Image (cartoon, grey):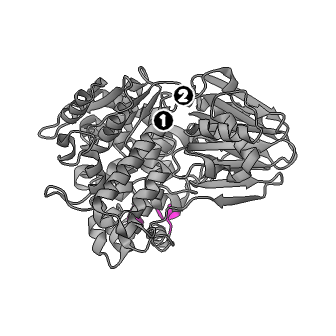
């Protein structure tokens, strides 16, 4: 788990080493254990290392293999690297390290761009061929690890974060109107390849990009999530599906224990993280677990310690209960925004930031429960999709933050997209092959699009701000593929009088964790001070939206902003998000990252 930056030239000029050094410096929190820089003519690469696999210098990056004529910088973790190393040795390859980076390099030499088909893990990498001048970019199937690109005059820049690209200089700062439309409709999700800036792009998940020395490129999209049942699926009983889910989840958790550091767990007290802890505890290790909570606000509880303590006691973990005083949030909020690779409105961001800071003092690697709601159908908008006659419209009604008309009234004409590009995006993805039922189409777009650029990115950004590696078993691609084939009715079946959601996963969890954790109302990661914008927090958001920088940028109509500011708590999205916070966070991110570089 690390961060990298690179510049590749197509015009015969030498790469700008100073720019790459500046980019890599911004990435230093992602890799506090080591740094490296390599340059040779038209390419320069920088790397910051977090030592989790093979803590010796043998796995230092950038990694070069003169015999094969290859080099690599890599961010992530390949969980099956021991098995792949043995397979590659059988093909005659020799190894000088025990880590996963060298395995990727040898796998590329053996299988070319098809090497990604062999990997179980999360990854983003840049590989360059010394003799041909070809460069290859790759990203994992579910987009767990980030990879940003930006075209510059005569070349290309690549980095693990968008702020790192900006630090290199020469990147256009103009707002992308399509991205802004998505941001305001999908509660800050901007699907790849877009970013909020026209001058920067994201390599889509499950993509390998081959770049020739003259700058020509081609993409291979190597994985698709298919909801089509296999021949024997119709004959499976509920019990067989439950056993299959438990087995696949156990395998996913076991894979993510591969490390040269002890692996802990983030324990919210919900069924997802509790199941992960239970399956980790089966390994018999001295498991460290971590929970975070805030003070109550009126009748609303600010923590879920009742449930996380129950799980920790049941499995006798070395548990750390982390209490955060909301009065300290205001001073730490700018730090959390600085840690954001892109603007993210979720209140969970600052909570994860503070949790990661505390956890990083005790652990270097943790497992986390993100992804189960999307993969197994845990959100309230899925059950109505079972009877949907117009999937895109029904999904948009429950998911989108505002109508296109509201968007046009909010955004100044100079930054508008005249077309309703967000609903067109939904319709296009619903129509793609591999899922025929609206409910499956909704699950697919959330798992492969919305999940990538909200919870997954949030966890990556906030944990890596403190050099903490977070692994997400529910995004094991084989587990995701299995879940896609489970009949939606089984995923969404009601349980104990509640609306349906994650039924088959909960039934699997009953075999591992206390029933008290399962038979409870759905929880969340509460940050009351940000849910209710009042006092100093409201003053801060008002300042971001009305200061000189915001006025000069001119994204939003003044009258619309003032209308929202008069009563922020009255203006919520269908998913109960604050419309004021959404606008203010975008401005705060732009003022932090774009205006200062």
Residue 380 found in image quarter: bottom left
Where residue 423 appears, as percent x and y from the top left, is 43, 70
Q: Residues within 10 Å of mark 2 (few under 14, many from 20)?
A: many
Image location (x, y in percent) of residue 540: 34, 38
Q: x, y percentage for residue 442?
A: 39, 65
Asked if residue 144 is positioned above or below residue 444 in the image, the reply reads above
369 to 229, vertically: above or below: above
Question: Mark 2 or mark 1, which is nearer to you?
Answer: 2
Taking 472 as reference, is 2 left or right? right
Does the magenta stretch mainly form a helix, a strand or a loop? Answer: helix
Quickly name the residue at label 2.
Answer: 29
Image quarter in which the N terminus is found: top right
The answer, for residue 509, to whether it is visible in the render is: yes
Q: Secondary structure at mark 1?
A: loop
Give me the residue at 77% from left, 43% from top: 128
Report the span colored magenta: 407-417
In this rendering, position of residue 138 left or right of residue 554: right
| Circle 1 residues within 10 Å: few <14, some 14–19, many ≥20 | many
At which x and y percent is residue 196? 53, 52
Which residue lies under the disc numbered 1? 339
């Amino acid at each position: 788990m690390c961060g990298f930056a690179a510049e590749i030239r197509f015009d015969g000029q030498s790469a700008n080493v100073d720019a790459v050094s500046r980019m890599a410096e911004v990435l230093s929190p992602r890799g506090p254990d080591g740094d490296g820089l390599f340059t040779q003519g038209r390419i320069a690469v920088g790397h910051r290392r977090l030592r989790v696999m093979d803590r010796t210098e043998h796995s230092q990056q950038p990694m070069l293999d003169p015999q094969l004529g290859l080099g690599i910088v890599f961010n992530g973790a390949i969980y099956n690297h021991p098995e792949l190393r043995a397979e590659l040795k059988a093909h005659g390859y020799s190894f000088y390290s025990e880590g996963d980076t060298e395995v990727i390099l040898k796998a590329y030499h053996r299988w070319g761009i098809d090497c990604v088909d062999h990997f179980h893990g999360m990854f983003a990498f840049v590989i360059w061929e010394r003799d041909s001048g070809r460069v290859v970019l790759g990203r994992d199937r579910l987009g767990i690890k980030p990879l940003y690109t930006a075209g510059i005059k005569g070349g290309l820049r690549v980095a693990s974060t968008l702020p790192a690209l900006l630090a290199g200089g020469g990147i256009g700062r103009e707002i992308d109107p399509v991205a802004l439309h998505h941001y305001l409709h999908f509660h800050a999700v901007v699907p790849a390849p877009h970013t909020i800036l026209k001058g920067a792009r994201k390599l889509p998940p499950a993509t390998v990009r081959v770049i020739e020395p003259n700058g020509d490129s081609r993409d291979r999209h190597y994985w698709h999530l298919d909801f089509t049942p296999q021949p024997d699926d119709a004959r499976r009983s509920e019990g067989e599906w439950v056993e299959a889910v438990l087995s696949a989840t156990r395998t996913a958790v076991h894979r993510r224990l591969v490390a040269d550091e002890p692996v802990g767990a983030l324990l919210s007290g919900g069924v997802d993280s509790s199941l992960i802890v239970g399956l980790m505890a089966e390994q018999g290790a001295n498991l460290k677990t971590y929970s975070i909570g805030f003070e109550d606000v009126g009748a609303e509880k600010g923590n879920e310690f009742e449930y996380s303590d129950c799980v920790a006691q049941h499995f006798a973990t070395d548990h750390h209960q982390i209490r955060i005083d909301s009065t300290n949030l205001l001073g730490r909020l700018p730090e959390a925004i600085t840690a954001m690779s892109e603007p993210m409105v979720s209140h969970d961001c600052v909570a994860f930031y503070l949790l990661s800071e505390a956890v990083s003092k005790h652990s270097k690697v943790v497992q986390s429960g993100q992804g189960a709601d999307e993969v197994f159908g845990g959100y309230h908008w899925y059950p109505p999709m079972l009877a949907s006659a117009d999937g895109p419209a029904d999904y948009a009604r429950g998911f989108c933050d505002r109508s296109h008309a509201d968007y046009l009234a909010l955004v100044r004409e100079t930054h508008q997209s005249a077309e309703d590009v967000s609903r067109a995006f939904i319709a296009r993805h619903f129509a793609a092959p591999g899922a025929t039922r609206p409910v499956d189409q909704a699950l697919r777009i959330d798992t492969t699009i919305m999940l990538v650029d909200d919870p997954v990115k949030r966890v990556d950004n906030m944990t890596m701000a403190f050099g903490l590696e977070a692994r997400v078993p529910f995004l094991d691609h084989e587990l995701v593929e299995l879940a896609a084939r489970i009949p939606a009715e089984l995923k969404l079946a009601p349980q104990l009088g509640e609306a349906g959601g994650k039924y088959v996963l909960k039934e699997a969890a009953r075999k591992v964790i206390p029933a008290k954790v399962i038979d409870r109302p759905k929880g969340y990661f509460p940050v009351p001070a940000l849910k209710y914008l009042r006092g100093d927090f409201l003053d801060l958001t008002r300042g971001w939206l009305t200061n000189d920088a915001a006025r000069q940028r001119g994204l939003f109509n003044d009258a619309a902003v003032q209308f929202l500011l008069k009563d922020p708590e009255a203006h919520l999205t269908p998913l109960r998000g604050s419309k004021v916070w959404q606008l203010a966070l975008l401005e705060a991110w732009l003022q932090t990252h774009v205006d200062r570089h």
